[in-house]
Image (cartoon, rainbow, N blue to C red):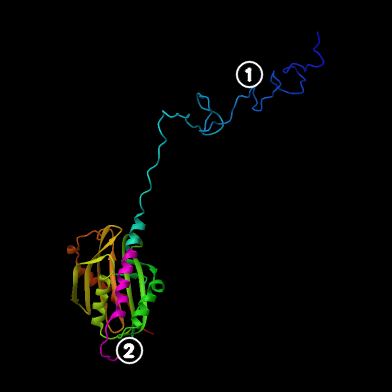
Amino acid sequence: MPPSPQQPPYPNQPGSPYGQQSPYGQQSPYGQQSPYGQPQPQNPGPYGGSPYPQQGPQPGGPQQPPYQGWGGMPPVVPPPPKKSRVGLILGIVGGVVVLIVGGLVALGAIGYKAATTFPDAKNKLTLPKTLLDDKYTFSKDLSGADGQAIESEANSSWNAKDVHAVVGTYTLGGDATKGNLVVSGMYGRFKDADQIRRNMMKGGAENAGTTVAVPVKDFDLDVTISCEVLVQDQAGTKITMPSCAWADGNTAATIAIVDMSSMSQDPSQVDLAALAKETLQVRSEAIKPIG
């Protein structure tokens, strides 16, 4: 008997206008027929896979292991990244810059003394491309940012005139993680160089969080070099900071050398005599005639 006019042809019969149709009148949007009239979901479950266990590799891209449920192993969480060694060193170098710039700023607090004649301006302090026989490579000029306070205070003191600040950092072989050298100084016309040098040492020691571990020692070389060892507390860590300074009629500067091997060194073990000789060499390489 032919089918009733009200009944559509059997869904699998050729010529059906509905293609592959459910016997319950619903077409599966997922391309396969559900035996119960509901589409069989093929989209991934909420955890990256089908909600039904899958066996074997699945086509269509990289495979993910099936979700293990609450009783399975938790996902592996990578450890937090280690702190940057460069960031640590640069933070310490920044503390050294503040320390020795503070020593120069303290010049403005020098008391009154009978005026004497200012020397002629013959030499200037520079930041060469390298220092200590090319051992340290120039890194950054901080004269503009940190030098303004030096110039303002020094020009208001009784024994400094026509002051220009010079502040720069150097890295050991171009690598900040191996070592750093900081130069903080000025050039101009200075009276009583000995007093300037002593106040540079005193000013650095008066910075907050800083204590004097080894008092100032003077080394009589071509000029007098004064050195000391300070200890600074940076975020709960004690940092050993040896520094040396010189001052003459035209130039004055403090030198500090910082590296990972010395920043935790016992202050009493610091070789200040060797640092004084390096400071004298920095002076000879950084001073240039004016003109």
Residue 120, disc = 2
Q: Which residue was labeled with disc 1?
A: 36
Dot 1 crowding, Cα within 10 Å, few <14, some 14–19, many 20+: few
User: Which residue is at 38% across, 72% downward?
Assistant: 146
Q: Amino acid at mark 1?
A: Tyr
Where residue 289 appears, x then y in whole percent? 34, 83
Q: Residue at x 17, y 63 (%)?
A: 269
Which element is circle 2 on?
Answer: loop
User: Is 236 one of the magenta-colored residues?
Assistant: no
> Residue flagged by tag 2: what amino acid is it?
Asp
Query: Is residue 84 in sight in this rendering?
Result: yes
Report the Cα–Cα distance between label 1 and label 2: 104 Å
Residue 195 image-quadrant placement: bottom left
Give the residues drawn in magenta, as a range.
93-121
Give the mark nearest the N terminus, 1 or 2.
1
C-beta proximity under 8 Å, tags 1 and 2: no
User: Where does the image place residue 61, in percent across and percent down from the top left?
Assistant: 54, 33
